[in-house]
Amino acid sequence: MSKKPVILGIESSCDETAVALLRENNLGEPEILSNIVSSQVDIHKEFGGVVPELAARAHIEKIDLITKKALDESGINLNDIDAVATTSGPGLIVCLSVGINFGKAIAASLKKPFIAVNHLEGHALSPKLNSKINYPYLLLLISGGHSQFLCVEGLGKYKRLGTTIDDAAGEAFDKTAKLLGIEFPGGPQIEVLAKKGDPKKFNLPKPIINKGGCNLSFAGLKTAILRISKNIKNEKDKYDLAASFQKTMEEILYKKSKVAFQEFNNINKNKNKTFVVAGGVAANKKIREVLIRLCKEENFEAIFPPINLCGDNAAMIAFAGLEKFKQNQFNSLDFPAKPRWQLDENAVFLKGAGVKI
Ligand code: KG4
Ligand code: ZN
């Protein structure tokens, strides 16, 4: 039997240093051999956000140790790697450069192919790590830097149907958390606090909810939270605002996904109706519930990555690398770090859509 490809994946686009080893098993399915994520939360929390210079420094300090740990855990010898897949954008250039140069150096020394992976493509394909999904599918990518609806037509073939015209969904979660006095990154904490609050207490705006197709906007919501948060008097108010914010998010994503379903159906008549939700915010259980309900109503199949693969990780980068490896899609060692790298390169560039933070 021919040797199944083993891919080393490296991710350093923002504040997570991550390395993974992935192999295709005999059934042709991806098998994660190791998946190490080192978060820099403790470094950045006193600043209330990611400080690029500190992030880059931490990547430099950690990347070889994390790689050694990933290799040890996988039981794979460096010489058995078939290709090195590295996030090459979008993201913070000083951070991307650390991973990309490290990945290139390993590829060059092993004389193995180097594969430049778009971080967003990693998220877009991440649900394929544990589910069989046929192309085309509708993707909602909701992370700290992006909120987009895309029609995924195949590997590397993305058609953007809608995008945020200002902030990303994850950014709105993080900013709301900050206004409620929760330490960075507060997005996941909103989910916890929301359970204790009354979601009907505050009536918050849903910008462009009835216009703009499946484009999204969260800036007006953030401004409303800023105004209300100034009058928060006690813990109960805090819980109510978290619950009201999360409920508003659920309603926006429900409504806009419904519009995206129509657009997807118009261009993919008689094709599978699969809705994939990926990115950090896809870890939110209430948002999952609401989108699963919508899928039932609209006869779509809902697919999410496992919670631990929603946020940034290198297993998804290695997997995108594996898919490209199988199609001989390699990159030369002069491939640059691309801080702005849209998935649909034909889509009009909008600030906030294709920029990590
Ligand atoms: O995909 P990701 O790890 O990084 C980017 O590529 O941006 O997404 C991070 C974002 C952050 O804004 C974080 O607050 C948000 O995902 N997030 C959540 C939850 N877990 C992470 N937002 C809402 N609910 C959660 N449970
Ligand atoms: Zn990400």
Image: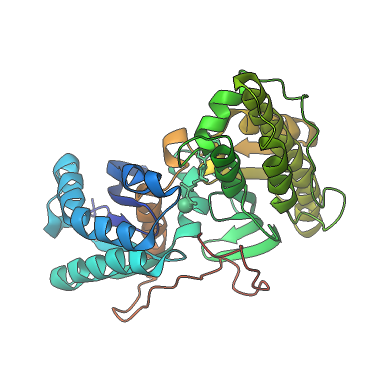
- Pick the residue in front: 197 or 300: 197
At x 45% / y 59%, what residue is drawn?
A: 119
Q: Residue furthest bottom?
A: 334
- Pick the residue in front: 134 or 158: 158
At x 80% / y 49%, what residue is drawn?
A: 259
* Label total for image: 0
| Residue 275 vertical placement versus 106 (above, below) | above
Q: Residue 29, can we see it?
A: no
| Residue 255 vertical placement versus 137 (above, below) | above
Name the spot of residue 130 as percent of width and height, x first. Answer: 45, 38
Q: Please, which colouring scheme is shown?
A: rainbow
- Pick the residue in front: 314 or 232: 232
Name the spot of residue 199 as percent of width and height, x first. Answer: 73, 25
Horizontal side of 60 relative to 141 (left or right) equals left
Horizontal side of 246 relative to 70 (left or right) equals right
Where is residue 173, by image quadrant?
Answer: top right
Horizontal side of 159 relative to 342 (left or right) equals right
| Residue 128 vertical placement versus 201 (above, below) | below
Name the spot of residue 95 as percent of width and height, x first. Answer: 34, 63
Q: Residue furthest right?
A: 210
Q: Residue 8, can we see it?
A: yes
Name the spot of residue 166 as percent of width and height, x first. Answer: 67, 59
